Amino acid sequence: MTMKHTEKRLSWLSCLPGDVPDGLRTPLDAAWTEIAGATCVKDTSRITLCPREDMGDSWEIAKDGADITITGGPTGILYGAYGLILALAAGEPLPQGRQTPRYALRMLNCWDNADGTIERGYSGRSLWFEGGRLSWDKQRIRQVGRMLASVGLNVLVINNVNVREPAQELIEDWLPQLAELAAELRPFGVRLMLSVDYSQPMRHGIPTADPLDEAVQQWWKDTAKRVWRAVPDLAGFLVKADSEHRPGPFTYGRNHAEGANMLARAIRPFGGMLVWRCFVYNCQQDWRDTTTDRPMAAYQHYVWLDGQFDDNVILQVKNGPFDFQVREPLSPTLLAMRKTNLAIEFQLAQEYTGQQIDLFAMAPLFEETLRQMGPERVMSIAAVSNLGRDACYTGHPFAAANLFCYGLAAWNPEVSAEAALRRWARLTYHLPEMQETALTQLLLNSREIYEQYTAPLGLGWMVTPNQHYGPNPGGYEYQAWGTYHKANRDAVGIDRTQKGTGYTLQYPEPLRSLYENLDTCPDNLLLFFHRLPYDYRMRDGRTLIQRIYDDHFEGYDRAEAMARTLASLDIPDPDRTEALARVALQLRNAREWRDVINTFFYRFSGVKDEHGRTIYD
Amino acid sequence: MTMKHTEKRLSWLSCLPGDVPDGLRTPLDAAWTEIAGATCVKDTSRITLCPREDMGDSWEIAKDGADITITGGPTGILYGAYGLILALAAGEPLPQGRQTPRYALRMLNCWDNADGTIERGYSGRSLWFEGGRLSWDKQRIRQVGRMLASVGLNVLVINNVNVREPAQELIEDWLPQLAELAAELRPFGVRLMLSVDYSQPMRHGIPTADPLDEAVQQWWKDTAKRVWRAVPDLAGFLVKADSEHRPGPFTYGRNHAEGANMLARAIRPFGGMLVWRCFVYNCQQDWRDTTTDRPMAAYQHYVWLDGQFDDNVILQVKNGPFDFQVREPLSPTLLAMRKTNLAIEFQLAQEYTGQQIDLFAMAPLFEETLRQMGPERVMSIAAVSNLGRDACYTGHPFAAANLFCYGLAAWNPEVSAEAALRRWARLTYHLPEMQETALTQLLLNSREIYEQYTAPLGLGWMVTPNQHYGPNPGGYEYQAWGTYHKANRDAVGIDRTQKGTGYTLQYPEPLRSLYENLDTCPDNLLLFFHRLPYDYRMRDGRTLIQRIYDDHFEGYDRAEAMARTLASLDIPDPDRTEALARVALQLRNAREWRDVINTFFYRFSGVKDEHGRTIYD
């Protein structure tokens, strides 16, 4: 891809200057600086900032003629400043009434490794790790800070949940540099959080990491003291334990409440939160074993522990029961733990959803998931980051919309996907209205298009193993990951109803019946919940096999139409050039998916397309 | 694997001392030293060595009472010494008459990278590269030298045919070290050969690697002069051009005769041979394209050039038309180029044949391939090495038999597989006769067993992509490698007859008709040549699908029986412990293959096993 780089690429913050000055110390400093620098603010002398200690993240704008007063808490004042700036930049009316975020912790989880690589990163290398140590460009860190703050995100987990050597040093020898990084982000109200290695005491001569062992407990208490002395506003620790070969309490015959509470108690004196990922399943499943059903694992591991977690523990649960597939039902664990602090976890990094080559705007995912769950079911929210050292930070310039819309949803889950995407498009490109609408619609539809040309009807997992881009419909079929479709000459899918694995029983009514019954199960989850013959009649009268073919032909055609629309828009360069180059790759990928999936099912079913379109032998 | 290492592990050279003394300069030196050190030689004072300049690699033993005279050429004298030693160690009668190798160059191709890794190596790291440079343990190099010489191998290509940076330095800055390595191996009659990068002139400011460009030609001439000044007995260069993304003459619109002859002329003044690998095919095939058939590629690329290659060019052709699969027909290219120097290439490294975990003795492969081809069709022979830095050099201690039997076949293709394997077993373990027979039979059958539990009837390629170990029957189906089986609900295989891709037409009679006709096509190649329905009746009356099931159940059962036999043998440790540990892994692998392949075909065919054995859904 050839492109002309502009000096700085700020996506939805295009009204702000390219650099953030040195010397900011507080969010109030940052608020003033941003207002003063924003091209959309005409007369800064008419703006007053009123910090109020008791308002926390909240803010309010009052307008009196040409005079504007922003009242807000220590961080709220900065959020209010961005609220004003973005409203002016978008030509919107100023927000009315008090603005308060729905969730306490609005987290971004970065899977950055100390060597500078990013696990499942598609936007270049890490912004703060290189060569096995912390290392960063101050201006780029500040850009990250303002991007996060401008959409209200307040916690940044800087290292991979898979804590590989030497990242353990973050809470040991690297504390001075960590304190510097925290200071860089503090003016933006962004607090750091760290992923920790559950077995870390064993680096220090302690023969176990058993949470009930006193030496282990003492080590974590001492460590916490040192860590919070260096970074007093550290938000907490994030742990992936007993998951995909990570160590954890199971190693010592302890349950996850015992495991999490031990750490939580060590960091409680400093106000730290312990975020515990509920991504536990048997990743060495025998494909012959039909009694184990991977999506049931989180519920089985955690729900019986409801009420046993300390109040500074947060269980972080992925939005779906598998692992960030294109379409999954809501994780039943999110509905089943009333006495536990929960956070829902999304993945902005497009691991299974196009790897920042194919367009996949996630705003509709946030909207429908939070709505279905009920926003109040969780007290915090997290997303795996899509940021990296690329010039545009997100690989595909449009992928910034996923970060933006995630921030909006984290602040206020009631914002519609369409409104969020339109706002991003407007702030980023300032297109004529018809083009803005076209871009908004293009983004809004991108998920459904991707869904149509990839694995059908909620089946998931037909990706190239390990890499997770491109089709390989049999690639996971005989593997140890618990992700099977068991397609044969007659039927496809796993029966997850009461007559099958019983997964539907993990849902409360009315969802249980909704998914259980073929008459009500949504089409886009049909093959997630049911095993069906190819000649099964869908509600619209089509057979299942014909629906699969139709979706794949249509998905590709819609991707082509999307590419044409994109080419017609006056997106400024370099974004335009980059977006066109990527959509060309997307079309190649979409064609491959269409033909491989259609052929795969044709070979099994022997059924030709009713409309005579080409399916290869 | 726990094991007790003995100091040195010499496999079939167990009658020799663990170390080779310093100061050897010629094969005659080595011959004396080996005879003097061999435990099987009782009275060295009765042995006379008669070197004769004109005898080359040949040798002859004369016995007069207790006096033994070995007459032989500069290298032949050493081969004769090993001939005597191994005959005595095996308790065999001394060889009668003049012994002369069938092939001029008896080559071992090592795919060692400069960083110390070995491409498709399963025996540890490189014996002569480490950390981006040449680096070796003298004793281990000498062991390699005596292993090669003891079975008559005389050319060692030390670097990977995929020449990656900085291995280009071998013919540039590393010449002094290269000369030292050559000197280490010279007493064993082993000459070095180097893989070269066809585009290497472009590292020196020449804008092209076009073989017709004068600057390119001059660069190679100058380089050859420098190289042979450093290593005067260098055997030549080996080139993988225009293959799997390697540069080559096609880049410049030249054919491979033009490409090879240019290099051959540069090295001809120094007696160098130019070995040119015929592994050219389209590795970016579209799976939808049914007109391209990868096994046809070498023939299409090379046969029309027959007669156009200089006489110091050797075309090195793999034994089969694909790529070292478990079972392939003979490459038709080997039968079609009467006016070109050819070498046949085998692969001792068990890339697709069990990775030195599963047992796969290749002696039957050498025997049947060379017999079918007619040994005289080629003038040289090559094999990809299975050597590495492991204590036993070959990963699995029994894998040494593949190197041993390859050497025997390269010297004399008439030696039967059984005789070669028995000789290796006897020389290595000195077991009681019944056990020796059991081990010989175990090895002799190991290929057929492996064949039974992996991809059926010559189909190949059902391995895990990239890794090439373990089953993944759909893994290559939609990839760019041209290795498809196109299994569907009715049938499996590619029709390579005249009615299909026409591949059979590349064979002369009677092979053409043999393979073309279902009545005569060997069962073990049936699905290589034909696309057949699952209910096809085999000559023995079984259906194709039942034959597939039978083979897989039987293959696993035979692997189990093999493991039992192995456990009953008095193999000395550490070989016994290692072999038992590996056969346990083999059983796990065999079970996986059996079940995955059976399930794969059951899902397509819907046909149950006639004998009611378990096939998973």
Image: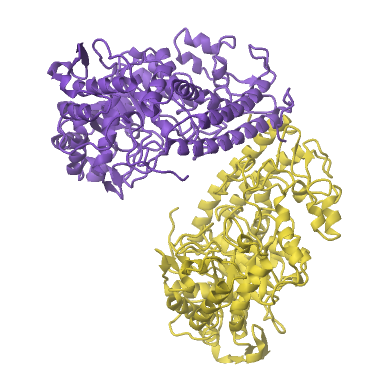
Chain colours: A purple, B yellow
| Image spot of residue A154 (x, y percent) | 26, 26
Is residue B487 or residue A149 the one in the foreground?
Answer: A149
B268, B387: nearer the viewer? B268
In-image side of B514 versus B350 (left or right): right
**Residue pictured at 44% horizontal, 66% vertical:** B129
In this rendering, would B111 be left or right of B265? Answer: left
**Where is the C terminus of chain B found, in terms of image quarters?**
top right
Residue A542, placed above or below residue B29 = above
- Residue that extends furthest to the top in the rendered view of this protein: A510
Residue under the image location 42 percent in, 37 percent down: A573
Res B286 quadrant in image: top right
**The image quarter in which residue A6 lies:** top left
Question: A264 above or below A173?
Answer: above
Q: Can residue B66 be seen in this view?
A: no
Q: Where is residue B266 in the image (x, y as percent from the top left)?
A: 59, 77
Residue shown at the point (49%, 56%) measured from the top left: B577
Describe residue A191's horizontal placement relative to residue A438 as left or right.
Answer: left
Asked which quadrant contains residue A605, the reply is top right
Rendered location of residue B14, percent (x, y): 53, 72
Q: Is residue A319 above or below residue B374?
A: above
How many marks can you see?
Answer: 0
* Residue B186: percent from left, percent from top: 52, 81
> Is residue A392 visible in this depiction of the protein?
yes
- Front position in the image: B99 or A337: A337
